Each structure stands twice: as C-alpha cells, then as structure tokens.
Amino acid sequence: MRYFIVDDDAASRKMLEKIITEGNLGIVIGEAESGVQSLQRIASTNPDVVLIDLLMPELDGIETIEQLRLQGFEGQFIMISQVVNKEMVGEAYEKGIEFFIHKPINRIEVRSILKKVAEQYRLKDSIMAIRQSLAHFESVETTQRKRSVKEIVLPILNAMGIAGEAGSDDVLTMMELLVHRTNNVEQLPSLKELYEAVARQTKEAETEVLKESKAIEQRIRRLILTAINNLAALGVIDYTNPEFEYYAPRYFDFQEIRSRMKQMEENSELPIRVKVNSKKFLQVLYLETKENYNKA
C-alpha cells in the first residue's frame, strides 16, 4: 500500500510514517503540512490511501477531500483528528472517509486500522475482478432473452435484505401489474387502487378484496420498515457501503434512516417512531423496474 500523509503537525507525520514503515504496512510516498500543499503532490503521486488531518489552516481536511475528488482522485481517505462531534464525523463519512484515527496517535490503533484498510483494498480488487467476469456472462445471457420483472425486482429487494419477508410477494405482484398493464405511466395510481388490484389476484368477493387490501397495506408497511432498519444498520457499520449509499436516499426519506442510525449508535432501547413513506418506495421501485425491463 502507498500512503500520503497530510498533517500540519510534523511530529504526527513522523510518527505515522514510522508506524507504517516499522510495521511493514506499506510505504509513505509523500507528505504535506497543509491541504493546499497536498493537492498537486497527491495528484502527481496518486497514492492508494491518504491520511489527512481534519483541522488545518487554509483548507481543512474535508475541504481538501472535496478538492481532490473534483480533480478525479479515487484513492481512499483516513481522517486524523481529535474531534469527536458526531455531526462532523458524519459529514466526513459523507465526503468519502473510510476510517478515523484519533489523536493523540496510538500505535496499536493505527496498525489495526491500516490493516483493515489494506484488507478492504484487496477485497475491492477481488470483487471488481469477479464483477468483470460476471458481467461477461450476464451480457451474453441478456442478449439471449429478456429479463422478467421478477428477475429485476428480487435483486433490489435482496439488496435491502427484504426479499424473503412477508410483503415481498405483494410488491412483486404489484410491479408485474404496473409494468405489464399500465402502458408505461410515470406516476402511480393511488395506494388504495394498487392494494386492491393486488388483492383481486387472489380474491373475488368485494368484501374479501377490501379486507385483503388492508392486509397488503400493513404487510408492505412492515416490509419497508424492515428495509429502513436493515439499511440503517449498514450505515452505522460503514457509511460508504454501496447498498446504503444507493438505496437509502433514493427509496426512503433519508432523515428517517438517519434518526434510526442515531438510535442504533446510542444503543437506545427506547422505541422510535419512523415515518414509512410507502408511496415513495413503490414509486421509485416501479420506475427502476420499468427502466431495467425496457432495457432488457
């Protein structure tokens, strides 16, 4: 692994370099005492990992990361800071931070984190190789036949950890009805109409349809709540998790997921009311399903 260190404290830079070198964790290919000085050096050396201090003059750590991302830098970041404010930590993760190293610098903590980063780096390389191999086979398969709605929807539900939950079959039936029978409409009918349409697939009497539609509504609400909990748990563990980054802001009211994450982080046992926006979830799922179905 190739590291670059950005910190206005020379002693911290020296200590980090010593830990990396003596621990055979990689090589330090450069360093800078400010964010401004680091921009050109990082762009020219293209390190695998940048260890960067949060609080620096001129450009702080977060602003430096933003500049580097705008310049196309794709390496990983590890933040170095004494800051423990959760809001600032959350902002740092949103900007692409992988891990935090706390000051004063602890040799054991640094070695542990850098080993995790190296393992994550190797894992990403392995996943990329697997995806490239799978992409070849998938491209061959999709040229031979059109994917069904079920083959599109189930991986989406599975990514949110709800493919086998009660209510997933209702959602699948709903997407099949919408894709095949709505003539490519952009906006969904009312939720009441959707639930009743699904209910009529198994019920005939109007009283049974109404009763089943209410049951479907509750199953889908519980399904969405489970997805919120699953994604919140992913976000607490790793804010840069691909499933969390993709699904949390698109399918849900992100503030609700952040509230659930905060409760998990604080290990609070008090119940928290989470707003379930069924309309948004189903609307986004329908548009994504329709787009992929028409491409297939």
Image (spheres, rainbow, N blue to C red):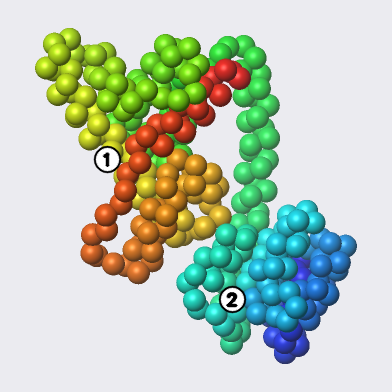
Say which mark, if any, is on residue 187. Answer: none
Q: CA distance from mark 1 to mark 2?
A: 38 Å
Question: Residue at the location (32% across, 22% down)?
Answer: 194
Above/below status of 32 relative to 118: below
Question: Residue at the location (63% across, 38% down)?
Answer: 130
Q: Amino acid at mark 1?
A: Arg
Q: For residue 187, what is the image quadrant? A: top left
Q: Position of residue 115 (x, y in %)?
A: 61, 67
Report crowding for label 1: few under 14, some 14 to 19, many 20 or more residues within 10 A (C-alpha): some
Q: Position of residue 257 (x, y in %)?
A: 40, 53
Looking at the rendered image, the quarter that the C terminus falls into is top right
Question: Residue at the location (41% across, 18% down)?
Answer: 178
Q: Amino acid at mark 2?
A: Ile
For residue 127, say whether it is visible: yes
| Position of residue 208 in the picture relative to residue 65 (left or right) | left
Q: Which residue is mark 2?
A: 101
For residue 166, say whether it is visible: no
Question: Residue at the location (50% across, 16% down)?
Answer: 184
| Position of residue 236 in the picture relative to residue 146 (left or right) | left
Q: Position of residue 271 (x, y in %)?
A: 23, 59
Q: Which residue is mark 1?
A: 222
Above/below status of 271 relative to 82: above
Q: Secondary structure at mark 2?
A: strand
Above/below status of 175 relative to 224: above
Q: For residue 47, what is the image quadrant? A: bottom right
Report crowding for label 2: few under 14, some 14 to 19, many 20 or more residues within 10 A (C-alpha): some
